[in-house]
Amino acid sequence: MDRQPENDPPAIISYRVLVNGVVTPLTLTVEGELRWTESGRRKTTAKKGILSFVVEGNKVRVKTLVEREGGICCGGNVGDYARKDFDFEPLSDESRKLWCDKLHEHLDSLGRPKKLFVFVNPFGGKKSARKIFVEEVKPLFEDANIQLEIQETKYQLHAKEIVRSMDVSKYDGIVCVSGDGVLVEVVNGLLERADWRTALKLPIGMVPAGTGNGMIKSLLDTVGLRCCANSATISIIRGHKRSVDVATIAQGNTKFFSVLPGVCQ
Ligand SMILES: Nc1ncnc2c1ncn2[C@@H]1O[C@H](COP(=O)(O)OP(=O)(O)OP(=O)(O)O)[C@@H](O)[C@H]1O
């Protein structure tokens, strides 16, 4: 292990490796950053920016998130990330194995979802959910090695119907690439189940692709993130969760549930 400069976050592993053909100490910090030196300058990836890694021959390719310059995410760059590969070559087989073990351990410790059920409403908002999903959401989930079961909604209340009978134990969460309408259907579907207490524990993620997107806008806003597909997807990958209140609206024998953003912590 190489020695770390003082004030640097503690290292999970720090060893000399080849980066762009040059030997440099490379450090994986507890904050999920990779740090190295290139042409005399210290470089780092974004904190908590590692999505996954693969070994290709002698090389380790780490799929990372980097803060995007210029910000094309709803007009700003807060919480706006781009995907970027970072390649390095450990100097021995033993070192490569150690790096892989430590990267695995680090990723496993983050409590990220492994399998998600995804609803895509092709008719929500500007009818761009399919494009948003294919171009912005799916590549990030794939880089994070998250298994997806994808369902486009085919008619009104389709999401509710599916959720009412799905095997919730198979998933770490449900994601709605939609507006608030599909989210409300999912919540109603879960609450109409006999096992609703257990089913409601399943986290529900949202990627804005509707008209108002009030719920996800409010949730991202409370943590200072822009409301866009990129930051919403990354929050889901990182397993960020927040409880929200469910309101019951009753009229005669008819009962309906809705969600209230930003009520409980
Ligand atoms: N294939 C489909 N054809 C017609 N309607 C659909 C289809 N799939 C889902 N829907 C319905 O579309 C409605 C609106 O969807 P969604 O919430 O995604 O968008 P939105 O209403 O534009 O957004 P917001 O609620 O944020 O304003 C939902 O109530 C859902 O039942």
Image: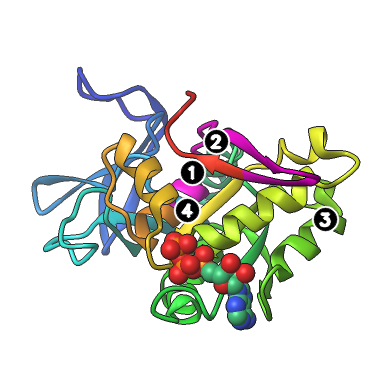
Check disc 2 and give the amino acid type: Leu
- The residue that appears at 30% across and 24% down in the rendered structure is 9
Position of residue 131 relative to residue 248, above or below, is below
C-alpha span from label 2 to label 3: 30 Å
Foreground residue, 244 or 31?
244
Q: Earlier in the sequence, mark 1 or mark 3?
A: 3
C-alpha span from label 1 to label 3: 27 Å
- The residue that appears at 49% across and 51% down in the rendered structure is 92
Which range is magenta?
Answer: 234-257
Residue 255 visible, this angle: yes
| SS category of the residue bearing label 2 | loop
Q: Earlier in the sequence, mark 4 or mark 3?
A: 4
From the image, tell me which residue sits under label 1: 238
C-alpha span from label 4 to label 3: 32 Å
Q: Earlier in the sequence, mark 1 or mark 4?
A: 4
Foreground residue, 247 or 170?
247
- Image x and y of residue 117, in percent: 69, 60
Check disc 4 and give the amino acid type: Leu
Q: Are marks 2 and 3 in contact (CB under 8 Å)?
A: no
Which mark is drawn over residue 164? Answer: 3
Q: Is residue 184 left or right of residue 260?
A: right
